[in-house]
Image (cartoon, grey):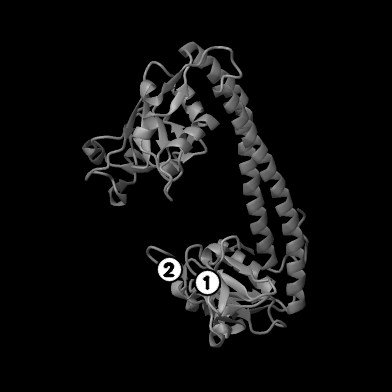
Amino acid sequence: MTQWQVKKVGDIADTQLGKMLNKGKQSGKHAKPYLRTDNVHWGRFDLSEIKEMDILPEEQDKYLATKGDLLMCEGGASGRTAIWNEDYDISFQNHVHRIRPKDLKEISPKYLLYYFEWFIKNGFASDLIKGVTISSLSQSGLRSIEVTYPPIDEQHKIVELLEDLLSRLDAALTDVRSAKSKSSQLKLAILDKVFAGEFFEFEMPILCIDEVAKVMNGDRGKNYPNKSARVESGVAFINAGHLDNDLLNIVDMDFISEERFNLLAAGKVELDDILFCLRGSLGKVAINDKFTKGAIASSLAILRVNPKVLPKYLYYYFLSPLAAAEIKKHDNGTAQPNLSAANLRQFEVPIPTIEQQKIVIDFLDSELSRTIQASQTFESLFSTGSAMRRSLLQSAFTGQLTKEVVSV
């Protein structure tokens, strides 16, 4: 293998944090487009919502990025990096690092870009990314990162091979995303026709949720279990994150003690209860088919059905475009999507007889099982694609890629 070197970022590149946005000095005589962390993604920039910032002539060397500079998030998604390839200069936020190689004959910006992706995503910078509420990668931390690199000609060869292989991998995953989208559209189309009464000839009278289920909030009082009340095992404490792809995910379940559970005045879960997300990820839903005892977080509501409706029928209703329309109608319209239990009670649901509901459930079990299997296949392919990307980057920065081209 050609002789490789190991140097710190601070030895091979100049780094600079940007300027804090001054809302009183925007769109002035010296206004420049202004990148925030939200605009910086891995390998690309999102310029759909770009602000401006006055950068005085004497500040431009310090606070402008030019073509070929790397820009990296300091906070939030620390380490996320892209190369600025536009023909105009751009300013950048004080939470964004500008990384400018000192000598392009020694280190390639594109090589650095892929190296940072490999280094950050493999957790090698975890000791450098610090913070209590918001994690950040400081200037000193960035400059201390060690970069392993070969001579410039081999760097260019590595980048060329990576771009070819990763572009083919990305194209394959784009096809997977397209197929996943079509599968999701098919699922929604089936649910739409079922709850619009187009698949079956029987009558489906419209009832409010309040007529078919008791809707209950969690306990939001002084006994609410905050993080300090969580224990290793005990009574399940279910939040919106546990409602995973319409299933109740018990792998990363939270727990509270029996004593804390007994203190709760509301929000206690029974088998076959429907759990519905009222805030944030509005409409996420699952049937509790796992726990005979449990409690819900404040972002959820419990729906406990009465004899007029079967739990799984109501669950399928919540997956349908009809329920999505009800959510949109009752959402309070603020920045944080939000419903109340009172809103949920007003949802209108087409409810046939119990025997007819069983027919609907059997039909949807059969039809949607294909889309569920397809979804599982898609997730497996995405996971495989991520693993292949990691493997390609690993081989690139250990000198193997230029010895043996990995087939994709």
State the residue at coordinates (42%, 48%).
334
Circles 2 and 1: CB atoms closer than 8 Å: no
Q: Position of residue 124 (x, y in %)?
A: 53, 66
Q: Return the residue nearer the eye: 232 or 173.
A: 173
- Say what secondary structure mark 2 lies in: strand
- The residue beneath circle 2 is 130
- Say what secondary structure mark 1 lies in: strand
State the residue at coordinates (30%, 35%).
267
Looking at the image, residue 6 sits to the left or right of residue 303; the answer is right
Q: Is residue 270 placed above or below 327 in the rendered structure?
A: above
Q: Return the residue nearer the eye: 274 or 261.
A: 274
Q: Residue lying farthest front?
A: 29
Q: Quick check: can you spot residue 269? A: no
Mark 2: few/some/many CA within 10 Å (<14, 14-19, 20+) = some
- The residue beneath circle 1 is 96
Q: Is residue 145 placed above or below 40 in the rendered structure?
A: below
Q: CA distance from mark 2 to mark 1?
A: 15 Å
The number of callouts visible is: 2
Mark 1: few/some/many CA within 10 Å (<14, 14-19, 20+) = many
Q: Return the residue nearer the eye: 319 or 248.
A: 319
State the residue at coordinates (52%, 74%).
53
State the residue at coordinates (64%, 58%).
390
Query: Which quadrant, please, contains the N terminus?
Result: bottom right
Q: Is residue 4 placed above or below 310 in the rendered structure?
A: below
Given the image, on which type of amino acid does mark 1 rest? Val
